[in-house]
Image (tube, helix red, strand yellow):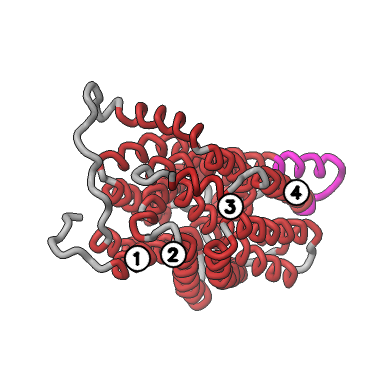
Amino acid sequence: MTPTTAVPSKKKQRWSWYLYDFGNSAYAAVVLLAVYSAYFKSEVVGGAQGSFLWGLSVGIAMLVVALLSPILGSLADYAGTKKRFLFFYTSMACVFTACLFFVTKGAVVAGMALFILAEIGYRSAQVFYNSLLPEIASAKEIGRVSGNGWAIGSAGGVVCLIIVLALIQFIGGALVVRLSLVFTAVFFAAFAAPIFLWLRESPAVGPLPKGSTFLKLPFQRIAETVRAVRNYREFGKFILAFLIYNDGILMTLSFAAILGTVLYGMNQQQLIVFMILVQITSIPGAFVMGWMTDRLGARASLFASLGGMLAAVIWLYFSTSIVGFYLIGALAGFSLTGVQSVSRALVGLLAPEGRSAEFYGFFAVAGRTSSFIGPTIFGIIAARMAIWFQNRGLLDLPAEQEGLRVAVLSIAVFLLAGGLLLLLVNERAGRKAVES
């Protein structure tokens, strides 16, 4: 992490940023989407309780990140230490992802604790990774660069899933599933390495203000940011909308594998194929929405992406065939990457120069706070409704299926409410306020 005398080219710095997403997406694809979530729910815990504990685990990790992100983000902006924090949290994510190998049937506490630590590392690292976007892209190209990152990242998820699928297909067994988690950690670490070698971040702002300390500084900067947000009203309105619709996105991601397992009886290989399809369709989604952002504006692109996600969720509620679930996954993959990529780009467009990590920290607070609420609500609804249906005579599996279908409707509510709040955001006015 020691800077060299020769400054890497802008192209090389961008590719190091893209490659980080290539490795980072392997964690999301294997741990969150295709392998560990289903393994934890079905093998480690079992039954509707597995859905509840998975949602609780995701929620706890998100709550910790929500509390830490604004503090660390403001400090990193001032001290020029974004890459150091990124290195620490990336290492944390990789180490504890590899440690998931030791989670076996019935090891519920260990399965939750190790995942929570890995998830805290993964989500916290994203704060500092995202905050480096304005370092490598101007306002005119930030949508395209952000979209490229998501597309290349999705390709990384596909590559990792194909390798994992081959291992499970030809060898099989719980041991291979656990080994796939170690492979994912190594994959993530390998492709994360270039960003620490090639990407140059802005230097520290300067010496500490008079009367301030590194302990006080984050809280002083947070207070300044809160006051600053009042002057950047469109950023504040966007964060409020994001707080709501991001719940829907992350609830979908957190429970996709569980929905496939319970509603459609998909095995591990089918789940991986499904997630590969989601990752593949997300690649053109990222490129298209990045193109739309630079030409039509971020808000218009967000509306298009949210509309696609809402359609996928409503379709999911009524779908009863596994073929339909695959088609829903394709639509969701195209749309959800657009939502995430364009949201990230819009923060960079609405954040004042020199305070990107600080504003991305607040962006993370909104996302992680909503993530704590969303998956927890989904898990509670699914578990409680399963009990409700059981008390009315349904057997365990049909009751669990009906409980999950009811919970799916909560995703639609969050997406729709967030989209309505997005109508209040004036992107042109927000960008003008930053430029003035």
- In the displayed structure image, the side of residue 351 where residue 258 appears, left or right: right
Mark 1, mark 4: which one is toward the viewer? 1
Quadrant the C terminus occupies: top left
Residue at image mark 2: 145
Task: Kindly identify the amino acid type of the residue bearing the numbered disc 4.
Answer: Leu
Residue 193: quadrant of the picture: bottom left
Q: Is 297 one of the magenta-colored residues? A: no
Tell which circle, 3 or 2, labels the residue nearer the N-terminal end: 2
Task: Kindly identify the amino acid type of the residue bearing the numbered disc 2.
Answer: Val
Residue at image mark 3: 254
Task: Kindly identify the amino acid type of the residue bearing the numbered disc 3.
Answer: Ser
Residue at image mark 4: 409
Residue occupying image coordinates x 45% and y 69%: 152
The stretch of residues the image draws in magenta is 381-398
Cα–Cα span, label 2 and label 1 = 8 Å
Cα–Cα span, label 3 and label 1 = 29 Å
Disc 3, disc 1: CB below 8 Å? no
Residue occupying image coordinates x 49% and y 55%: 345
Cα–Cα span, label 1 and label 4 = 39 Å
Mark 2, mark 4: which one is toward the viewer? 2
Q: Give above or below for 243 relative to 304.
A: above
Disc 2, disc 1: CB below 8 Å? yes
Q: Give above or below for 271 relative to 2.
A: below
Which residue, as the protein is rendered here, is positioned at the far top?
A: 211
